[in-house]
Amino acid sequence: MFEKLEIVRMAQAMATHAGARQGAIATNIANADTPGYKAQDMPDFAESFAKGADTALRMTRAGHIGAQGGNPQLIARTTGGAAAPNGNTVSLESEMVKAVEVRQQHDMALAIYRSTSSILRTSLGRK
């Protein structure tokens, strides 16, 4: 019942996006010394959520009928930047800034979820 509330779905999508983006950042940091590695990033949450707001069917598992494509939030993209002499484009400074942004996004999603839960409990007369 509660997962049908739009605000709860948005908070869940924001937390999922933050987790997936944190994984991409961790992969970039892990490959900071790998020759030829190209840094990857994901689209912003607002961009991903807007694309996912349509009512078209989405494929979440192989074998879904009539669905096209996958989850757009999980598609990594290459970011621009100056490459090191070995061809690596990872900047540890920018990855750390992105990690802080992602943590703030995840904290915001949890705060939205907590506030919504508190409002629902209050409306039901529970504390």
Image (cartoon, rainbow, N blue to C red):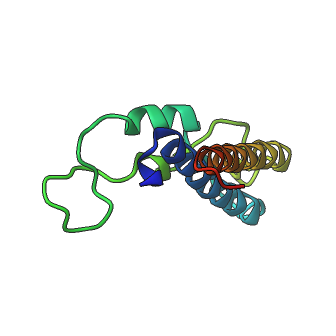
Extreme-right residue of the structure: 93
Please identify the quarter of the rendering in which residue 62 is found. bottom left
* Residue 47 percent across, percent down from the top left: 50, 32
* Residue 22 percent across, percent down from the top left: 68, 56
Q: As displayed, is residue 2 above or below residue 80?
A: below
Front position in the image: 54 or 115 = 115
Q: Quadrant where the C terminus lies? A: bottom right
Residue 94 left/right relative to 43:
right
Q: Residue at x 64, y 43 (%)?
A: 119
Q: Residue at x 63, y 50 (%)?
A: 125
Front position in the image: 90 or 11 = 11
* Residue 34 percent across, percent down from the top left: 71, 64
Front position in the image: 42 or 61 = 61
Task: Examine the rendering and report whether any part of residue 39 can be seen.
Answer: no
Task: Examine the rendering and report whether any part of residue 109 can be seen.
Answer: yes
Extreme-front residue of the structure: 125
Q: Quadrant where the N terminus lies? A: bottom left
* Residue 50 percent across, percent down from the top left: 44, 31
Extreme-left residue of the structure: 66
Q: Residue at x 63, y 57 (%)?
A: 19
Front position in the image: 7 or 67 = 7
